[in-house]
Each structure stands twice: as C-alpha cells, then as structure tokens.
Amino acid sequence: MSEEQRIEALAAACAAIIDHPYLQNVQIERTLIGRRYSLRVAFNTRLCVYVPYLYSESEALSFVKKHRRYVCNRLRPQPVLPAYEEGDAVFLFGKEYIVARAGDTYRLEGERSIDCGYDVKKHILALLYRNAETFLHDYTRAVAADCGIACPKVTLSHAKSYWGCCRREREGVTVSYLRWACLLPERVLRYLVVHELCHIACFNHSRSFWAAVQKALPDYKERNKLLDDYAVADFNARFGVRW
C-alpha cells in the first residue's frame, strides 16, 4: 500500500470514528518536527488531524477516539465563518453586511454601501490594518462606560489562539484584542469586551469574576458558546495571514 493510500485509509477510519452528519471531510497532515498528535476542527465542518512523520495508525485512531466529544461539539451544519463571496452575510466593525456583486466588482450592502473592488477579503484586510485599533478602543470605551468601568489602554494582539487578554503593566491595565475581533458579530464582540473588562477587577475565572460578567450580560453563557464557534486559526486560514 502506498503512503497516499495509507493516508486516505486513515482519514476514512477517522471519519468512521467521529461518525457525525456535519463532518464534511477529514484531512491528515504529517508533521516533520515533533512526535505529538494533534487535531482541530476547521471552519466548523472539517477535521484536521496532524500526525508525526513516523506515525502509527493505531495511535492516530486512538487519539481521535479520545477527542471525539470535543470534535462533535465543534461541528456545525455549515461554516460559521463566511467565505466572503457573493451572497454571504459578513460582519465588519459591529455591523452586518451582505456581499453583493456589481459587474466585475463587489460591495458590502448594509446600513451603508462599501465598495470592495475586485477582492472582498483584500479590501476588508486593508480596512482592518487602518481602522481596527481605533474601532476596538472606541468600542471598549463605550462598553466600559455602560459597565461603569474606567476604560483601560487598548492595543492589538498577535496571539495565535485567544481573542483577547487583560494584563497589568507599570502604566496601568492593558486590554489587547486580535484584529479579527472586528469581524465578529456585535453580540459576540460585546461579550468578548465585557469578559476582558471584568478581568480588570479579577484576574482569574473565579465565581466573583463570572458574577461580574453575568451582571453586565445576563445571557453571557449563550454568547460564550457563540464565541467558541469562531476559531482564530480559521480567520488566519481564510485571509491567508498571521498577525
């Protein structure tokens, strides 16, 4: 059996273990460095399994079986993150738009129309580079005012996995977000901001912290689950960049 056939057989066996109607395909990738197995659910529909270069089918299948519940919890009928193609509903700076085609070019139609030229993703990326930090600062300041919290310093993060963080520095407290936060639905973005603001008084996830979050957002648990549907790695893959 060729290596390509081994990979195909392993992918089919992994799909059989997951056995979920929302799983569209399984992708096996061999890593040249390290001897660990890992996996992630991409775009809420695809299972990516990373195996060592000298992998064992039995070890790989055992690993997937061990994490089946996690995989099933992440699967959805369709990707949450849009492809930014014609007809897709997209979010930008807290507003919802629909991607529309105008001849050979595209535009975002919502409360106002935004011309995107020939490439929607390229145009949105340019907007993020120019406006993300200002938008996130202004949005955080507005949410902090609603919560009765002094607005901290706001910066951009280059984290690989988490959406935001709150940390103490000599100059005071700083809250950092990924630029991708500007592409989250407003309901999810507000939860993210409230979460980080509540860390100013409580730098952990104790009962008192969650009580503060619930005071600001009574439905925070539902919003938290919605945020879990959005993976940083998916945005990186969709736009082809890493901050």
Image (tube, rainbow, N blue to C red):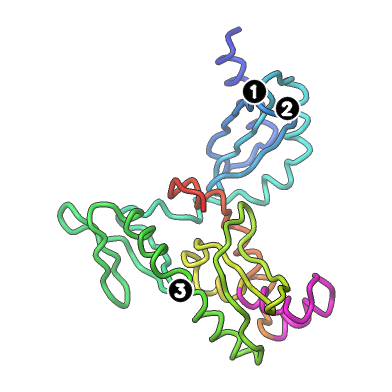
Q: In the picture shown, does residue 33 fall above or below 124?
A: above
**Image side of residue 25 versus residue 110, left or right:** right
Query: Magenta residues, as a range?
Result: 193-215
Calculate the distance from the C-alpha at mark 2 to the C-alpha at mark 3: 41 Å
Q: Are marks 2 and 1 in contact (CB under 8 Å)?
A: yes
Which of these two is toward me, 190 or 82? 190
Up the image or down, 242 lies above or below 39; here it is below
At label 1, counting other C-alpha atoms closer than 10 Å, the crowd grade (few under 14, some 14-19, many 20 or more) is many
Marks 1/3: CA distance? 42 Å
Q: Which mark is residue 94?
A: 3
The residue identified by callout 1 is 10
Mark with earlier residue (2, 3): 2
Which one is nearer the viewer's eye here, 235 or 203? 203
**Residue 101 drawn at (x, y percent):** 22, 57
Main SS, magenta residues: helix
**Quadrant position of residue 199:** bottom right
- Secondary element type, mark 3: loop
Residue at x-position 67% and y-position 38%: 39
- The amino acid sitting under disc 3 is Gly
Q: Hey, what amino acid is under mark 2?
A: Ala
